Image: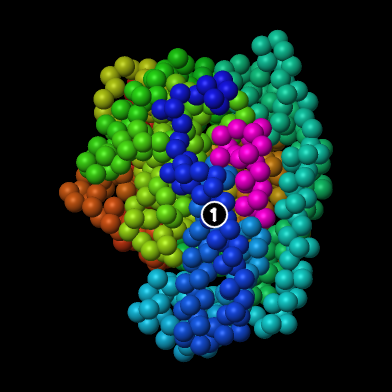
């Protein structure tokens, strides 16, 4: 379908940001005109009035730029072959470079101020919008080096960061895989198509995709191992240079999250692997297999149980499921669904997938490529969770504190998915549909809580090995990864090829990031449980979390909602739900 043929009711209204091209151009010119004014404050941030004026001007520039950037890129996503949107997006990319260059002195200059000066700014009511930003600069000062040392690290940054580029080129350009025969035809195998092929109901297709993919990685494994070892060495070097005890401490310090959260996650999951092993055994039974393999973990275990709802019916279902959030929340969902916040249908040239995006000064937007499947219904709930999290934060917080951090970014969206899953299970009587929904939930936990924690443990152990002087050879990395798979999934399901999987995980080049997926689903499970069982909790969640933005550390924000990820309680909630879902699926499958 061409973009022009998409009915208006299924299109987002980007004119809510800029009513016309002329309005866009006017705003573009305003940002260009303001940028040079920042330079007048360089070298003067020790003066209270100059610092305040500089921070206010920088906020004005970045707030206006945010509108330009989001608008232009969403316009380009409507049709990536249409020159207008792509052109606008390209121009704002160029403008971003100018903005970043102009403001580059601010953080380093503030960081060079005495703590006594920063404390005065933080306590000054006129700096109220910037107090957390300044507190973070002060918090990070202990790991800022001398000017000479910072210059040396900056000069070395491109070389130290080159391993990520090497991995990306290998995985996405140079690596080629033998095609797979599917339905009597050759199907191209790529990193992108692998997931779809691994979910195929034909086991021969799954096995071929799995075998052919890892044959490709195995052929380059020495290069990949040497490259990843270099990445780990770089991580550990930078952590040492900046005075951290280790790389984990550096990663968690950047998130402003205690290292106890990471350690508690791994410990809690390792103590609760028995139910995962039970689920793997049930999968084997439901698929009718004598022996289950790693390539059997992604295909649906219940056939022909999709909810094939038209978009409008899917929206009504989502609103009913999220009714426990209260009339105000449901009213905002309805507003988003009916007033041009969502771009619903796929069209030629449209960006794939789904996302929620927005910026201060306009309501958030959601991009979908809706098809009548169960997964896409959950996607509506998920993306609207992001959307309303942004809406509440931007409504309650000043611009400088409205953005929430990555550590909590998936919590509201996954909470919505949890509420939808519970609603469906409470209102669906059909046995096959119940089995499908239960397996959907169990797989969500398996792939997010269990698998991402296994990834987190691999990263932790690899960095520890390098610090202890143990070489990260192919044999060492493969052995570590295979042992983790045996521990998490059981020896029966683990084969030799899975030992190579570490080499295709791009997130490993961004150390200590993946744990946030696991903590996110854990926090969401606990929050959804509290919403459904505690009187008054919805208001706590809305006021303390959804409206919190980034006005304090993300860990502290979660603690305000009675979810402390350094304790066992959130994990107990998650594993209890997993066990209950598994119990019911086992009973329904006898």
Q: Which residues are magenta?
A: 75-94
The residue at the point 45 percent across, 58 percent down is 403
List the single residue furthest toward the left: 535
The residue at the point 63 percent across, 39 percent down is 84
> Can the viewer see residue 90 in this picture?
yes
Q: Are there few (<14), some (14-19), or many (20+) residues within 10 Å of tag 1?
A: few
> Can the viewer see residue 262 in this picture?
no
x and y, in percent, of residue 80 in the image: 64, 35
User: Splitting the image into 4 quarters, where does residue 94 fall?
Assistant: bottom right
List the single residue furthest toward the top: 184
User: Splitting the image into 4 quarters, where does residue 492 fall?
Assistant: top right
Query: Closest to the observer: 470 or 84?
Result: 84
x and y, in percent, of residue 201 in the image: 57, 17
x and y, in percent, of residue 214 in the image: 73, 34
Our reading of the magenta stretch's main secondary structure is helix
Is 78 contained in the magenta span?
Answer: yes
Whether 187 is drawn above or below 68: the answer is above
The residue at the point 78 percent across, 53 percent down is 227
| Quadrant where the N terminus is found in the figure | top right
x and y, in percent, of residue 565 in the image: 40, 57
Q: Secondary structure at mark 1?
A: helix
Q: Which residue is mark 1?
A: 26
Whether 65 is drawn above or below 282: the answer is below
Is 39 contained in the magenta span?
Answer: no
The residue at the point 42 percent across, 62 percent down is 399
């Amino acid at each position: 379908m061409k973009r022009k043929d998409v009915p208006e009711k299924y299109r987002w209204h980007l004119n809510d940001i800029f009513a016309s091209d002329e309005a866009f151009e006017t705003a573009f010119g305003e940002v260009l005109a303001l940028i040079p004014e920042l330079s007048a404050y360089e070298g003067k941030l020790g003066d209270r009035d100059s610092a305040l004026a500089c921070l206010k001007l920088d906020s004005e520039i970045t707030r206006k730029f945010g509108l330009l950037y989001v608008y232009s890129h969403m316009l380009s996503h409507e049709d990536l072959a249409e020159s207008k949107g792509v052109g606008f997006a390209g121009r704002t990319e160029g403008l971003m470079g100018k903005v970043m260059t102009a403001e580059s002195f601010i953080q380093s200059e503030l960081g060079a101020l005495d703590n006594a000066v920063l404390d005065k700014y933080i306590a000054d009511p006129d700096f109220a919008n910037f107090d957390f930003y300044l507190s973070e600069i002060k918090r990070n000062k202990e790991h800022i080096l001398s000017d000479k040392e910072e210059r040396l690290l900056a000069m070395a940054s491109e070389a130290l960061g080159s391993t990520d580029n090497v991995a990306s080129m290998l995985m996405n350009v140079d690596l080629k895989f033998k095609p797979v025969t599917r339905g009597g035809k050759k199907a191209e195998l790529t990193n992108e198509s692998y997931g779809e092929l691994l979910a195929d109901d034909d086991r021969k297709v799954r096995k071929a995709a799995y075998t052919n993919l890892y044959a490709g990685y195995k052929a380059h494994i020495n290069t990949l191992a040497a490259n990843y070892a270099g990445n780990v060495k770089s991580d550990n070097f930078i952590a040492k240079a900046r005075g951290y005890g280790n790389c984990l401490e550096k990663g968690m310090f950047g998130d402003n999250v205690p290292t106890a959260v990471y350690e508690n996650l791994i410990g809690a999951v390792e103590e609760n692997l028995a139910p995962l092993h039970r689920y793997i055994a049930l999968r084997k039974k439901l698929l009718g297999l004598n022996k289950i393999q790693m390539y059997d973990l992604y295909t649906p275990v219940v056939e022909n149980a999709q909810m094939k709802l038209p978009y409008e019916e899917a929206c009504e279902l989502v609103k009913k499921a999220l009714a426990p959030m209260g009339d105000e929340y449901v009213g905002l969902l309805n507003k988003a669904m009916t007033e041009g916040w969502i771009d619903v249908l796929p069209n030629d040239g449209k960006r794939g997938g789904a996302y929620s995006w927005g910026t201060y000064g306009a309501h958030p937007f959601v991009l979908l490529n809706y098809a009548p499947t169960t997964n896409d219904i959950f996607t509506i709930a998920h993306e609207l969770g992001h959307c309303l999290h942004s809406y509440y934060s931007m409504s309650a917080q000043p611009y400088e504190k409205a953005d929430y951090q990555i550590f909590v970014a998936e919590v509201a969206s996954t909470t919505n998915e949890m509420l939808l899953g519970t609603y469906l299970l409470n209102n669906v009587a059909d046995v096959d549909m119940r089995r499908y929904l239960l397996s959907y939930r169990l797989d969500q936990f398996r792939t997010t809580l269990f698998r991402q924690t296994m990834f987190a443990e691999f990263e932790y152990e690899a960095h520890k090995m390098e610090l202890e002087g143990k070489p990260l050879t192919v044999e060492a990395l493969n052995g570590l990864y295979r042992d983790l798979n045996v521990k998490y999934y059981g020896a029966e399901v683990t084969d030799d090829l899975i030992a190579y999987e570490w080499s295709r995980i791009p997130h490993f080049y961004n150390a200590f990031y993946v744990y946030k997926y696991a903590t996110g689903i854990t926090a969401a499970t606990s929050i959804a449980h509290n919403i459904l069982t505690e009187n008054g909790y919805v208001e706590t969640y809305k006021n303390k979390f959804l409206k919190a933005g980034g006005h304090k550390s993300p860990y502290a924000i979660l603690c305000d909602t009675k979810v402390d990820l350094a304790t066992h309680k959130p994990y107990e909630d998650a594993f209890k739900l997993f066990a209950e879902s598994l119990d019911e699926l086992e009973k329904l499958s006898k």
